[in-house]
Image (spheres, rainbow, N blue to C red):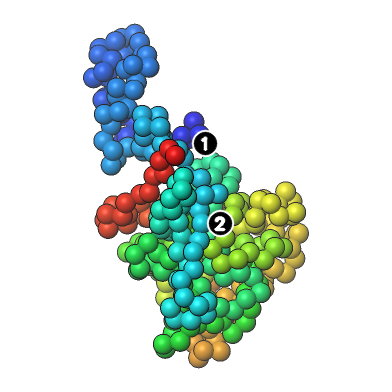
Amino acid sequence: MALDLGEPFTEEEAKEALSNLAKYVGSEIKEKPKLNFKYFISWWSNLDKESRSFKLIASQILKGDKPFNVDKVMMHPEGDKFTLDYRLNFFYAEGKQLKKISPWHDIPLYVRGYGTEAEELYFICEIPKYTRAKFEIATRMPMNPMKQDIKNGRTRYYHHQSLFNYGLFPQTWEDPNHHIKFPSGKTYPGDNDPIDVLELGYKQLKTGDIVKVKVLGILALIDDGETDWKVLTINVDDPMADKVNDVEDVQREFPGVIDAILFYFKNYKVLSGNEPNTFEFNDQAQNRAKALEIIQETHGFWKDLRKEENVPVFTPVTT
């Protein structure tokens, strides 16, 4: 059911839901359950809107809201590209109107499946492959537009072209207050950003593109003393997508690619005068299952962040 409705209840939420549902069904639920649609919709319509795991789908049933449609996301640039003033804003088309949205908070993470059972996720491209300009979602700006990173008052460029389409998973956050202890015994905090994603397909995407990907594995980069996960993925429409499902498939079908990624991220700051970065797990990419586990964890951290900062969630309406 989670594939169609969204996130499942936790065990605690399930117990609370059954307790509340009993108020509408009465003692019959304890003896001989008799649940009909009237009882169910009465219970659902009175659920706490802030804590309800299925709140989005409930609102769709009760109010006629439509699910978020990524095909209706549009982008509008402000300023000249590669300048300090450039911003790429995201909008959602509702009939003849455009509503400004946050690509970080409003674009869904999961497309098919959820958590460790996820099959497809939405990836937002920041830096297209074969380019050097470091574009990123501005997590500290209202509505989080895309902009070019700034260093020493100038727009930032990498010294070498990107080997992959680089970006993020929306609705994730690497919590800097969460310290991860690795098998090496070392402990590092999260880097305070959405989780990073590398898309390995043949096609060069554009900055701001939103595509469906499947997860293949994950690397644990340690950058400036922080955990900076790098998720390995491939566009579901890539010709090689059916041949790669996990790390061993990447090593077989794309020989040398993971080694090249390791070399790139270890040394990409060296020409700027920094020491080389390191990777945990002895430079070994972890499998798809581990990657999905980490993504789900960062999705949970994002939910906590959203509550703490009172970030509203955009819900499209029927047009």
> As displayed, is residue 55 above or below residue 200?
above
Q: Which residue is mark 2?
A: 210
Whether residue 118 is visible to the viewer of this picture, yes or no, is no
- Quadrant occupied by the C terminus: top left
Furthest residue to the front?
A: 96
Three-letter amino acid code of the residue under disc 2? Ile
Give the residue displayed 35% in from the left and 68% down from the top. 141
> As displayed, is residue 187 above or below residue 106?
below
Residue 13: give x, y in percent of width and height: 32, 34
219 left or right of 88 in image: right
Q: Which quadrant of the figure has residue 171?
A: bottom left
How far is the residue under mark 1 from the one under mark 2?
Answer: 21 Å
The disc placed on residue 174 is none
Q: Which quadrant of the figure has residue 235?
A: bottom right
Label pair 1/2, CB-CB below 8 angstroms:
no
Residue 183: give x, y in percent of width and height: 48, 63
Furthest residue to the top?
A: 32
**Could you classify mark 2 by the number of other residues whose Cα lies within 10 Å: few (under 14), some (14-19), or many (20 or more)?**
many
49 left or right of 37 in image: left
Whether residue 152 is visible to the viewer of this picture, yes or no, is yes
Three-letter amino acid code of the residue under disc 1? Leu
Give the residue displayed 63% in from the left and 64% down from the top. 205
Query: Of the residues tagged 1 and 2, which is closer to the observer?
Result: 2
Residue 306: give x, y in percent of width and height: 32, 54
Secondary element under disc 2, as helix, strand or loop, is: strand
> As displayed, is residue 19 above or below residue 66?
above
Q: Which residue is mark 1?
A: 3
2 left or right of 203 in image: left
263 left or right of 223 in image: right
**Could you classify mark 1 by the number of other residues whose Cα lies within 10 Å: few (under 14), some (14-19), or many (20 or more)?**
some
